[in-house]
Image: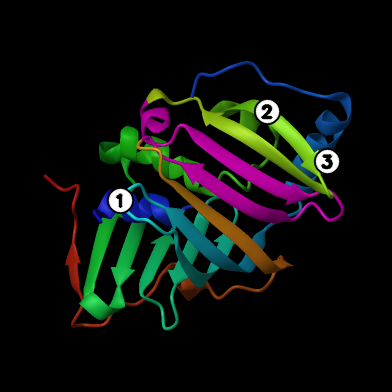
């Protein structure tokens, strides 16, 4: 699997022109309450079960892991025990670390890297909008549904380049506590990646070095997007 797909497969975290928003009176209130709750979130952590459905495989692939998020857009994903893949985003770069392979891939997030990569990377924190304007800037709400105190939003990215890579994002949140329950990313080839969260914690204390990991001297660092 190439570097780009690993980034998207690790998205919330996780992350488009389309039909106009579909709002029911009750669901509109639920979405507003959920968005209001996001303004109180500074950090968040949870256990995650990630399930990928690939056209090339007969059975889904599932792996357990852990995710941490810090507003506005820093995150860390770890999949496997011990961690087989670690994805870290801070203000300056995106880092994908493969401890077993002694390899890390660095993706600088400066202006030179604006374009499809940054557009799609912005979808990875789709579950943590900072308000209505933030959500509407990046997504169109295609539909909403409510079942057993869980509201599910179907979002379409507004960026054409991001939409080609990832035409649909589903976000599910609890209507009793406004916590993120799951995300599901649908890719252009029809494959999907579902993240189910549990044991989530709101505003836990997160060590700063979690988002700025020190790499062992024997890890080879490459920059796939560097020309």
**In the picture provided, is 129 more to the left or to the right than 80?**
right
Question: Image quadrant of residue 219?
Answer: bottom left
Task: Write down the residue under mark 2.
Answer: 143
Q: Position of residue 66 (x, y in %)?
A: 54, 71
Please tell me the numbered disc located at residue 188: none
- Residue 181 falls within the magenta-colored stretch: yes
Nearer the observer: mark 3 or 1; the answer is 1
39 versus 143 height, above or below: below
Q: Earlier in the sequence, mark 3 or mark 1?
A: 3
**In the picture provided, is 128 more to the left or to the right than 110?**
right
Q: Label 1 neighbourhood size at 10 Å, few (<14), some (14-19), many (20+)?
A: few
Instruction: Calculate the distance from the C-alpha at mark 3 to the C-alpha at mark 1.
Output: 40 Å
Q: How is the structure coloured here?
A: rainbow
Instruction: Calculate the distance from the C-alpha at mark 2 to the C-alpha at mark 1.
Output: 29 Å
Task: Write down the residue under mark 3.
Answer: 33
Nearer the observer: mark 2 or 3; the answer is 2
Q: Position of residue 203 (x, y in %)?
A: 71, 65
Q: Position of residue 100 (x, y in %)?
A: 26, 80
């Amino acid at each position: 699997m190439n570097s780009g797909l690993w980034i998207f497969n690790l998205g919330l975290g996780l992350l488009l022109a389309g039909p106009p928003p579909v709002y029911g009176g009750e669901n509109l209130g639920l979405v507003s309450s959920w968005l209001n709750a996001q303004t109180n979130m500074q950090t968040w952590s949870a256990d995650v079960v990630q399930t990928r459905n690939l056209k090339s495989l007969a059975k889904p692939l599932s792996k357990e892991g852990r995710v941490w998020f810090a507003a506005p857009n820093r995150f860390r994903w770890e999949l496997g025990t011990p961690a087989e893949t670690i994805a870290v985003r801070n203000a300056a770069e995106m880092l994908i670390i493969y401890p077993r392979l002694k390899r890390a891939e660095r993706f600088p997030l400066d202006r030179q890297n604006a374009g499809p990569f940054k557009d799609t990377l912005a979808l990875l924190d789709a579950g943590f909008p900072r308000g209505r304007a933030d959500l509407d800037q990046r997504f169109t709400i295609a539909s909403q549904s409510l079942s057993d105190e869980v509201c599910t939003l179907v979002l379409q990215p507004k960026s054409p380049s991001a939409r080609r890579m990832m035409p649909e994002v589903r976000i599910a949140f609890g209507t009793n506590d406004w916590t993120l329950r799951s995300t599901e990313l649908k890719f252009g080839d029809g494959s999907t990646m579902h993240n189910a969260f549990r044991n989530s914690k709101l505003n836990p204390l997160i060590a700063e070095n979690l988002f700025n990991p020190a790499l062992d001297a024997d890890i080879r660092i490459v920059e796939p997007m560097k020309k």
